[in-house]
Image (spheres, helix red, strand yellow):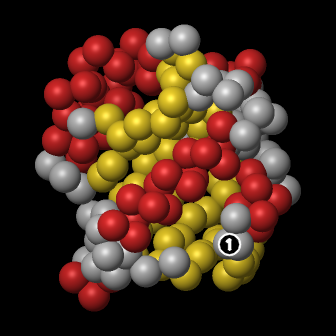
Amino acid sequence: MNDILIRELKPDDLPAALEGLVDLLHATVHGGASVGFILPFSSTDSQRFWEDKIFPALDGGRRLLFVAETGGRIVGTVQLDIDLFPNQAHRGEVVKLLVHPDCRRRGIARKLMVVLERRARELGRSLLTLDTRTGDTAEPLYRSLSYETAGIIPDYCRAPESDRLDSTTYMYKAL
């Protein structure tokens, strides 16, 4: 996995990346990730998410998208939301850290976060926030990157595979 390339996608890159992004999100949701979607979740649902929600935000400069690639295949992504109110222009929100289930535990998420944090600093952001399902494998990753827990909200979201309600952990990091 030393051949992992992390890059920021620009609006012109999006049409060529769409298929890989669709496949990644679809596989991640079906792999049990709690990233806002519930089963059943089709490739069409995944495509709609990217085209209707994310691409317009990227095109408008309100969000940044970073991808991890190996062998020309997208195996991970993370987003930086910078479309915040004027009194929050000093911060950004980390959104949808995804790693393909076949590629987990190889340092891809960490590499994505390091690049995102560097870019956030370049944009003058001094605080990052995020939320993650309480107890997920991402929680220790964020702690290892010096994110601190702000609090836990019980019964925050529905689990992707059942009617169970899961807690979410809010975290932050001063840059």
Circle 1 SS class: loop
- Res 128 visible: yes
Residue located 70% across and 65% down the image? 145
Residue located 76% across and 56% down the image? 141
53 shown above or below 90:
above
User: Which picture quadrant has residue 14?
Assistant: top left
Farthest-out residue, bottom = 87
Q: Position of residue 149 (x, y in %)?
A: 72, 77
Say which of 71 and 60 sits in front. 71
Q: How many labels, in total?
A: 1
- Res 29 visible: no
Q: Position of residue 10 (x, y in %)?
A: 24, 36
Say which of 40 and 120 sits in front. 120
Q: Is residue 168 left or right of residue 10?
A: right
Q: Position of residue 120 (x, y in %)?
A: 39, 65
Quadrant position of the N terminus in the picture: top right
As shown in the figure, which amino acid type bears the numbered disc 1?
Answer: Tyr
Say which of 152 and 84 sits in front. 84
Q: Is residue 73 left or right of residue 161?
A: left
Farthest-out residue, front = 2
Residue located 59% across and 37% down the image? 98
User: Which picture quadrant has residue 11?
Assistant: top left
Q: Position of residue 165 (x, y in %)?
A: 75, 53
Q: Residues within 10 Å of mark 1 (few under 14, many from 20)?
A: many
Q: Is residue 137 left or right of residue 74?
A: right
Q: Is residue 23 left or right of residue 154?
A: left
User: Label 1 belongs to which residue?
Assistant: 147
107 shown above or below 45:
below
122 shown above or below 7:
below
